Amino acid sequence: MTADLDQALERLQAAGLYRRRRVQDRPQQPEALVDGRPMLSFCSNDYLGLANHPEVIAALQRGAEHWGVGSGAAHLVNGHSAAHHALEEELADFTRRPRALLFSTGYMANLGIISALTGRGDTLWQDRLNHASLLDGALLSRAALRRYPHADAAELGRLIGEQDTRMIATDGVFSMDGDLAPLPALALIARHAGAWLLVDDAHGLGVLGREGRGTLDHFGLDAEQVPILMGTLGKAFGTFGAFVAGSETLIETLIQRARSYIYTTATPPALAEATRTSLALARREDWRREHLQALIARFRAGANQLGLPLSESPTPIQPLIAGSSHQALAWAAELETRGILVGAIRPPTVPEGSARLRVCLSAAHTETMVDRLLDALGALRPETPNASP
Ligand SMILES: *Cc1c(COP(=O)(O)O)cnc(C)c1O
């Protein structure tokens, strides 16, 4: 039996698809220590630089003193603390929606939402490049999953036609491409079809819109146009967990039916206290978003000048498309020899033939750091980025 597995692992190795973990020896920050070696990192989703913020750390410590560590039970048993409750109210206020509901992770939130609202006999449409958790939620729900070409609302409208559709689900900001979903057009299609629209804004919240209210605020869409907003707390907010925001009826339905909500232990209350602090910082400190936008503009101007294969991304996720997995790995390895860490993203995370370097910028980076990255990218051997088709 393990012989089969060994062979499968060898095939992954040969195809350049093998994945390895690195051991981080410091808190999340650009100046990383990786497997004992100092590296400048452009890998994290800590877009606002809050993961290691002293006020957030202090809130977690105070929270642990007050609440202990474990929540001890699921939310529906007796694990739902006043700290969780206050955070839910603050998330509802932040997203301008009647209610918000905490989930333990974004992965679990998507499984829970989709399987609670769709089932056998329903049709569910998803963008081809949606996050894996949205796809897995569809599989779990047993609804018929149909996928439309990436960000192509016109094609989705044509495909749906007059068909009965229960839900349309999309990333707000696409996690491996950094581009935005065409939400205004999707909202119109969903309304016309009488379908739920679910937007997973894991990478937009905190980063885009007023106070970091995300992709919906960026497009000026309200809770009627996008009835289900899902967000994660482990990215721009720098902590851990996720939430869904929407109507009273939606949230009550999820509490009754979402199995990934019901059958799991509530996250530690101290974590909720930490997130309350980071949410307040994220809302208040516009300078983090402004600095991040300046870094994005600097990176894009520099990369353009170097002739690097940039994509159309207005967000901190800046992919450089390599094509083959071996090419993406070769670029990442070469950057690594220069002390720069950038993720090489390969299938099945991205479609075959579109392996890439995924540069992630953060408000914790400085302009000098971005310049160091550009220098290293510019010094790659000629058969690497600049020469790629
Ligand atoms: C990270 C991510 C998730 C999963 O969130 P976790 O809290 O890490 O489980 C879901 N959707 C998208 C688009 C993501 O980027």
Image (spheres, rainbow, N blue to C red):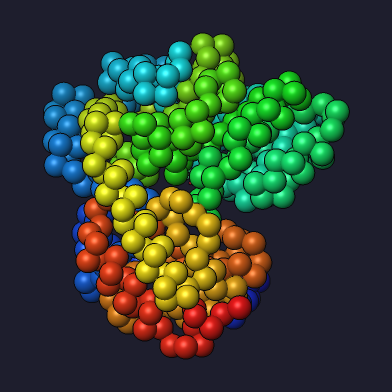
Q: Residue 318, relative to residue 128: is it above or below?
A: below
Residue 131 visible, this orientation? yes
Q: Position of residue 275 (x, y in %)?
A: 28, 32
Q: Position of residue 160 (x, y in %)?
A: 81, 35
Q: Residue at x 53, y 61 (%)?
A: 311
Q: Residue 342, relative to residue 223: is it above or below?
A: below
Identify the image quadrant of the N terminus: bottom right
Q: Nearer the viewer, residue 141 or 197?
A: 197
Q: Nearer the viewer, residue 152 or 78?
A: 152
Q: Residue at x 72, y 37 (%)?
A: 125
Q: Residue 67, relative to residue 133: is it above or below?
A: above
Q: Residue at x 62, y 51 (%)?
A: 129
Residue 333 horizontal side relative to residue 81, left or right: right
Q: Residue 40, relative to residue 114: is it above or below?
A: below
Q: Residue furthest right?
A: 162
Identify the image quadrant of the C terminus: bottom right
Residue 261 visible, this orientation? no
Quarter of the rendering containing residue 30: bottom left
Q: Nearer the viewer, residue 367 or 13?
A: 367
Quarter of the rendering containing residue 96: top left
Residue 270 horizontal side relative to residue 218, left or right: left
Q: Position of residue 270 (x, y in %)?
A: 24, 30
Q: Residue at x 64, y 62 (%)?
A: 351
